[in-house]
Image (cartoon, coloured by chain):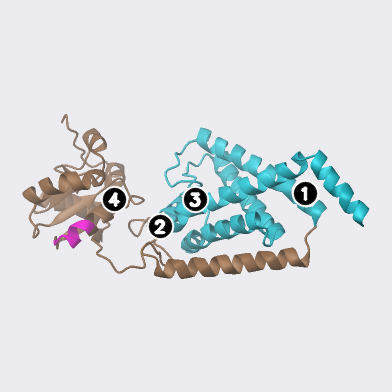
Chain colours: A brown, B cyan
Amino acid sequence: MMSGKDIRGCVVILVLALGLGLGVNSISPAGIPLFGQWDDQAGVLMAGSTREGARAEEVNNPLRVKQMIETGGIVLVDVRRADVYALGHLPGALSFPLSEFDQVIGRFRERIKAEDKVLLYCSGVACHDSHTFGAKLIEMGFARVSVYAGGFSEWTEMEFEVETNEG
Amino acid sequence: MKAESDTSAASAASNPSGIILPWSIRLCLGMAFIWASWHKIFAPDQFALILYGYGIFPADSINLLAIGVPFVELFAGICLILGIYKRSALMLINAMLLSFILVIGFNLIRGHQFDCGCFSLGDTKGAGSALWLLIRDLIMLGAGLFLWGRFRKTA
């Protein structure tokens, strides 16, 4: 069945593959660290990045988000698709879909100043879109950007008020 | 010895499917694994998220698998096609196919939805889709086992 040469060949292929994998990962712009953030209680789930890039701070407490919305002073931004936003969103949230970033960013800059406090959210802890949107804003000079990690799914699980376009 | 060689050549000439079929399977399996590795190598973060979605792997292993598995697929595919450690490459490919079948089957049985991430990072979820994945992997494993049988005969 299996010979010593077969086993040796498997080891050679595995060692070469893993060595090259780790090497490419360490120099690739898309590289990830060896360990990611996979605890859904600790914030947005992600593999992470080996690049030191702009990253928005996370708010990982729905009660705090609710308080922030009620107190005012923040611009709440929903980065999900517009049709999903229309079905239901957090009270007072503005729709700026990440999928249409290039089209909506002009309107975004007209309405929101770089010094405004911006809170972004998307569908939930497995969604990266709010972080992707946030990184772009930080690179553009928006200094007070944060992400609601639990997103819309956690908000509805908490049975907090949801607005629809009809309502 | 010469007579044996002549017999073998004559047999191959009279039965070209005996050569063409294993070679076609070898090429298809190798290409499939090279193709499957490509998008994962360029987007390991998305592949890691897909691995998390399977709901099976320990958290500390997800990034390591996302970094390593695509390169094992790539090397095994290349080695199988080029004939470098071809039996070892085929063993690894069959072992990976068996692992995929077990993981997909386990999730199908427990009703856990997941993105495959096999050949693209946007594969749809759903039981029908998972069943199709299972059938596809079973066919590929069948082809891999057939090839293993041929490799044993020619080794």
The magenta segment is A136-141
Crowd band around label 2 with a 10 angstrom C-alpha radius: few (<14), some (14–19), many (20+): many
Labels 2 & 3 near each other (Cβ < 8 A):
no
- Label 3 Cα crowd, 10 Å radius (few <14 / some 14-19 / many 20+): some
Q: Amino acid at mark 3?
A: Gly
**Mark 2 or 3, closer to the camera:** 2
Under mark 4, the amino acid is: Asp
Query: Looking at the image, can residue A34 be seen?
Result: no
3D distance between C-alphas at marks 1 and 2:
38 Å
> In the rendered image, which residue does mark 3 sit on?
B55
Residue where numbered disc 2 is placed: B45
Crowd class of label 1 (few under 14; some 14 to 19; many from 20; radius 10 Å)? some
> If you read the primary sequence from the N terminus, does the residue marked by circle 1 or circle 2 appear first?
2
Q: Which of label 1 and label 4 is nearer to you?
A: 1
Q: Which label's residue is closer to the chain start, 1 or 3?
A: 3
Residue A48 in which image quadrant = bottom left
The amino acid type, in three-letter code, at marker 1 is Arg
Q: Is residue A12 magenta?
A: no
Q: What residue lies at 73% left-to-right and 63% top-to-bottom?
A: A6
State left or right for residue B85 relative to residue B68: right
